Image (cartoon, helix red, strand yellow):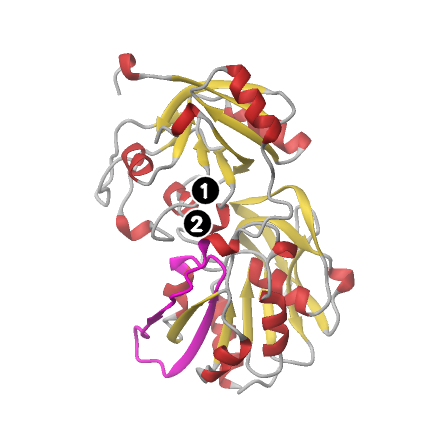
Amino acid sequence: MSSSSVQPAAIVLADGSLFEGEAIGAHPDGGVTTGEFVFNTVLSGYQEVISDPSYAGQVVTFTYPHIGNYGVNRADNEALRPHCRGVVVRDLSRRASNHRSEGSLEDWLTRHGVPGIAGVDTRRLTKHLRDHGAMPGAFGTADESELTSAAGGAGGTDGHDYVIDVTDPAGRTVPSVNGAPRRIVALDLGVKDTIVEQLVQLGSVDVVGSGTSAADVLAREPDGVFISNGPGDPAAVAGVAATVDALLGEVPIFGICMGQQMLASALGADTYKLPFGHHGGNHPVQDLDTGRVEITSQNHNYCVDPDQLTGARVTHRNLNDGTLEGFACTEVAAFAVQYHPEAGPGPHDSRYLFGRFAELMDRKGRP
């Protein structure tokens, strides 16, 4: 990009904090984009982060300073299109240098209608969000007064059901890649393609919309049901917890991220919002059964209150803040984790959990 094409841009958070930069990616009408600002600590995998449907309603700030250096490609998308509101980077690479690259990150952002801002002091922004919590704001090429007004009217994720915006009600069936005979129904709350890639190692997968009833799920005669990740406030997601409740005891269940929150809600537990969430690929989690510590990929703003869980035992804890990262039901065949064992591009410490799901299905529902 030549210096003559650079457009000054700025971020204004709801508390009035100002951060300056330059516009990248798509240019929204009116020069203003709003959303909830969060930060992600991954060192690589920016395409997977941006295309993760769980970021619906949010603006992703990358703490790693150099983003875009290896380009983008079709294989690394986690969904057909990004659902995040925008991206914030310190330094956007103007050249993609990798044998897998099919184009530049900025062109990809523009093509998918995702606005961004580069040249931002992301260290300062990250520290601000860490100290004051994830917060709504606005960014773009509009003047400061317009951005300030938009930031004041911007909302966070609390009380919003973003699952309805990202689920695919039409669904799809993906055959097993190795002839495994199991049949899995995946309830799509914003499911990532990398998760489906792991599930088809276990059997064929029917991906169904979030509004699918328990009766319709069971009519497919699955060996197991998977509850996926998804965006927004789990307490605001309509109907899914009741569906999961109706499935408990009927078929083995495995949940990831919002899938854990939906399973916990079915067991009577509430969720609460973390100050700035867990977003990154370097969070240590301990498996309490084995004592083993896993480095995990995470992307969630909300957490389950373990003291309210009934009929379940805690299996995993976050070693940074002690929050609940996994539990298993004691009376029915169901378990869940808050983090992402599929982890594209990584780490892969936790992929054994898909094998655990296979074992649970093969035991025909015995916990």
Residue 212 has which mark?
A: none
Percent across and percent down for residue 63 are 50, 32
Q: Name the residue at 55% across, 26% down.
A: 150
What is the three-letter code of the residue carrying label 1?
A: Cys
Helix, strand or loop at label 1? It is: loop
The amino acid marked with disc number 2 is: Asp
Judge whether residue 167 is colored magenta: yes
The vertical placement of 37 against 312, above or below, is above
| Magenta residues (range) | 166-194
For disc 2, the neighbor class at 10 Å (few under 14, some 14 to 19, many from 20) is many
Location of residue 264 with respect to 295 vertically, above or below: below
| Image position, residue 111 (x, y; %) | 29, 38
The dot on residue 52 is 2
Q: Position of residue 74 (x, y in %)?
A: 27, 49
Against 158, residue 116 (above or below) is: above
Q: Residue furthest front?
A: 30
Residue, disc 1: 84
Task: Check the picture and name the quadrant holding the C terminus.
Answer: bottom right
Most foreground residue, 141 or 22: 141
Indicate whether residue 317 is drawn in magenta.
no
Identify which residue, 155 or 135, lies in the foreground: 155
**In the rendered image, the vertical position of residue 232 relative to residue 155, given as above or below:** below
The answer to the question of whether label 2 and label 1 lie on touching residues, with beta carbons closer than 8 A, is: yes
Q: Residue at x 59, y 50 (%)?
A: 284
The quarter of the rendered structure image containing the N terminus is: top left
Q: Quadrant of residue 290?
A: bottom right
Residue name at image x 52 percent, y 40 percent = 58
Between label 2 and label 1, give the one nearer the viewer: 1
